[in-house]
Amino acid sequence: MNQLSRAIKIEEQCVLFTGRLNTFTRKGAQQLVLAAGGHVLNYCSSAVTLLVAGVIDKGLFEPQRRIN
């Protein structure tokens, strides 16, 4: 049993990764979840029980300009 499976019951989780991960590649992170007995999805679904949100590109969210 590794640290991930001790922290949460990963075998009961369906995980979706989003954003850029700083420490792991997406594939590496997915492999950790699978090795701990969890499931991984590559798309949003009602089956997702755990969302891992990495760094999101700030350029996607420009401040709104107020128009008077």
Image: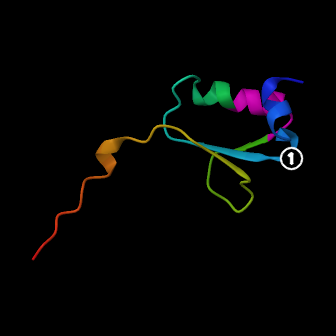
In the rendered structure, does residue 34 fall within the stretch colored magenta?
yes
| Label 1: element kind | helix
Residue at 80% of width from left, 47% of height from top?
Answer: 13
In the rendered structure, does residue 37 fall within the stretch colored magenta?
yes
Taking the image as shown, residue 63 lies to the left or right of residue 5, namely left
Residue at 82% of width from left, 39% of height from top?
Answer: 10
Residue 3 to residue 49: above or below: above
Percent across and percent down for residue 39 are 79, 42
Percent across and percent down for residue 4 are 78, 30
What colouring does the structure picture have?
Answer: rainbow
What residue range appears in magenta? 30-38
Total numbered labels placed on residues in the image = 1
Residue at 56% of width from left, 22% of height from top?
Answer: 23
Q: Nearer the viewer, residue 64 or 18?
A: 64
* Residue at the extreme right: 1
Quick one: quadrant of the C terminus?
A: bottom left
Percent across and percent down for residue 26 are 59, 30
Residue under label 1: 12
Taking the image as shown, residue 9 lies to the left or right of residue 47, namely right
Percent across and percent down for residue 45 are 67, 59
Where is residue 15, by image quadrant?
top right
Quick one: quadrant of the N terminus?
A: top right
Residue 22 to residue 37: above or below: above
Residue 18 to residue 30: above or below: below
